[in-house]
């Protein structure tokens, strides 16, 4: 990752992460609303796998809601860590196994 310039601040990064969480929640909410609409219109739709059969739309809607909640939580936690001053892009690991370890920082 390129070094952070003076123009970027932790508050800007936190705002961007929270904005991303908001956009992600809106997309997930829209998909869940679409799933609920299909559930109401076509309650007879069934999904089958390995010999088991289950209603399609409730499972789809719950999966979308759960995945959206996990994504929003991940982004929100990252925003909180950035607000606390943590650099999420710090060189914690080597990019590839063959890369040499970074030199120790001199202070």
Image: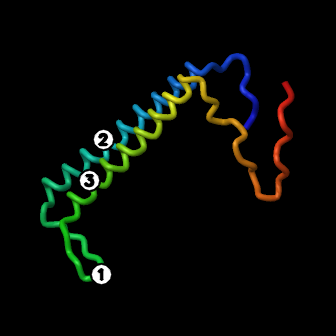
Q: Dot 1 lies on which element? A: loop
106 and 96: which one is in front? 106
User: Dot 1 corresponds to which residue?
Assistant: 50
Q: Residue at x 13, y 66 (%)?
A: 44
Please identify the residue farthest to the front as the structure is shown: 107
Comparing marks 1 and 2, which lies closer to the viewer? 1
Marked residue nearer the N-terminal end (1 or 2): 2
From the image, state whether disc 3 or disc 2 is nearer to you.
3
- Specify few, some or many for label 2: CA neighbours under 10 Å numbering under 14, 14-19, or 20 or more: some
* Disc 3 target residue: 62
Image x and y of residue 56, in percent: 22, 64
Numbered mark located on residue 29 in the image: 2
The image position of residue 16, as x and y in percent, is 52, 27
Secondary element at tag 2: helix
Whether residue 43 sits left or right of residue 96 in the image: it is left
Q: Residue furthest top?
A: 7
Q: CA distance from mark 3 to mark 1?
A: 21 Å
* Within-10-Å neighbours for mark 1: few <14, some 14–19, many 20+: few
Indicate the position of residue 42 as horizontal and vertical percent values: 15, 60
């Amino acid at each position: 990752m390129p070094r952070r310039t003076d123009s970027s601040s932790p508050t800007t990064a936190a705002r961007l992460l929270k904005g991303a969480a908001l956009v992600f929640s809106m997309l997930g909410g829209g998909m869940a609303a679409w799933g609920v609409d299909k559930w109401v219109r076509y309650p007879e739709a069934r999904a089958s796998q390995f010999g088991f059969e289950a209603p399609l739309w409730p499972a789809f809607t719950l999966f979308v809601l759960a995945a959206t909640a996990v994504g929003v939580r991940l982004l929100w936690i990252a925003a909180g860590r950035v607000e606390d001053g943590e650099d999420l892009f710090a060189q914690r690991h080597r990019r590839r196994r063959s890369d040499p370890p970074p030199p120790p920082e001199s202070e």
